[in-house]
Image: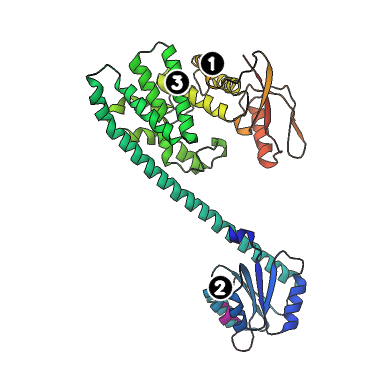
Amino acid sequence: MADELQRITVLLVDDEENILRAIQRLLMDEDFDIVTATSGESALEKLQTLENVGLIVSDQRMPGMNGAEFLGRSREILPHAQRILLTGYSDINATIEAINKGGAGRYLSKPWDDDELTRAITDAVALYRQDVEKHRLNNIINQQKEELEAWNDSLKKRLLQTTATIREQNQAIKNLDETPPAEILSRTFDNFFEVMGDRNAIHTRTVSILVTDVARKMSLNAETVAKFRLAALLHDAGKFGTHSLTLHKHQEEMSDSEVSDYHQHPTRGEEMFSKVEELAGILSLIRSHHEAFDGSGFPDGLQGEAIPLGARLIAIADQIEKSAHSVDSNRADYALMTARFLGGSLLDPQLVPRFQAITKVVYFEGRKTGTVAEVEITPEEVVPGMTISRDVESGSGVLLIQRGNVLDAAGIALIRSHYKKNPPAHGIFVQILED
């Protein structure tokens, strides 16, 4: 971050002080500091103490060390600085040497054109700034990658340790009661995620609570309920191999490569547990939790009731938890409304109403029922059927959609396009009706 905060220094080297003063006058309004030197030798000494030198501009013909030699020596000290050679005579060999050995990115003839010289210097400084920012971002990405890899390694070890105890626990209680093995596994992994305590763990445990409550109220047998609960706890395990910057993005915000990687996490999760015999019953649920009811999901494009029941329940709970987490108030009603609007496309419309009671409990806020309210959401979170509660305008004040309108696919596309190009300082306000 130090390079990002420091002002950039430009070093001018010429044995004629009047030329140095002339260039300084040209650059007096630019946003960088200027240091001068009258020889290559003195310039090299200054380079030892100067900070954040982004550009070196040197004359070619100087007593003692010429420009090409100086630029070559300066490259050993500051390999990433930009370099420009000023030459006042037709010496093509010196120019080639300055480019090949000294790393000069450009050369200009003397006498120069003031506008051309100013433009060349400002362009070179801008290029250096870009290189510094690129280097900074690469460092951040590499650091995050290392942290992610370390976290993944640690998590996988803990998962393996947890799995290693499963058989022992199963055997120990087998003769004591008739608790389904899946229930034992669920308790084990639930404790594991509780200890983790991060955003992913909270999401996982909440999805599990929602799915388990609905499965019980559907009068499914204890073994099936336990299996669904366990699958809900482990449904996103395949994301542990996904880059941390991608984890909480909407698909609309992802690049093509990020989308491709994201679409692999259900199969990665399935593969992670494929060799654990006790988890065989949940593999299809992990694999299919992103299948869509209309067949538009992944990884297999399953449709309707061809999607396993547990996977359909997990998909609804997953959507409810994400929607509730995205707003600051009216969480239950907003999440249920979003799930209802997605019924028939992403979610099973017959199963969505079963989540109403448990969602109200999990996200209880003590509000009166039957009141009209609104929430602020991002353009990526709007879905067809939502009612706009405030006028939607672009960042420049152009009215896009009036309040009271019900969103359709065209309206959503319009909003996302303008918010991407010219976003205002707030999100989209949509109306909800508390049941």
Residue type at the position of mark 1: Gln
Give the alpha-carbon distance from disc 3 to disc 2, as whole Å.
Answer: 63 Å
Q: Is residue 65 left or right of residue 189?
A: right
- Which tag, 3 or 2, sits closer to the chain's start? 2
- Give, as a single range, the part of the protein colored magenta: 60-71
Give the alpha-carbon distance from disc 1 to disc 2, as whole Å.
Answer: 67 Å
Q: Is residue 81 above or below residue 15?
A: above
Residue type at the position of mark 2: Gly
Can residue 275 be seen here? The reply is no
Can residue 273 be seen here? The reply is yes
Residue under the point 28% across and 34% down: 164
Residue under the point 40% across and 10% down: 219
User: Mark 1, residues whose alpha carbon is within 10 Å: few (<14), some, or many (≥20)?
Assistant: some
In front of the other: label 3 or label 2? 3
Q: Is residue 10 above or below residue 162?
A: below
Name the residue tied to disc 3: 211
Mark 1–mark 2 CB contact (< 8 Å): no
- Which tag, 3 or 1, sits closer to the chain's start? 3
Give the alpha-carbon distance from disc 3 to disc 1, as whole Å.
Answer: 12 Å
Name the residue tied to disc 2: 103
| Quadrant position of residue 22 | bottom right
Does the magenta run of residues contain 400? no
Q: Locate the N terminus and report the quarter of the image it occupies.
A: bottom right
Name the residue tied to disc 1: 356
The secondary structure type at the circle numbered 2 is loop
The secondary structure type at the circle numbered 1 is helix
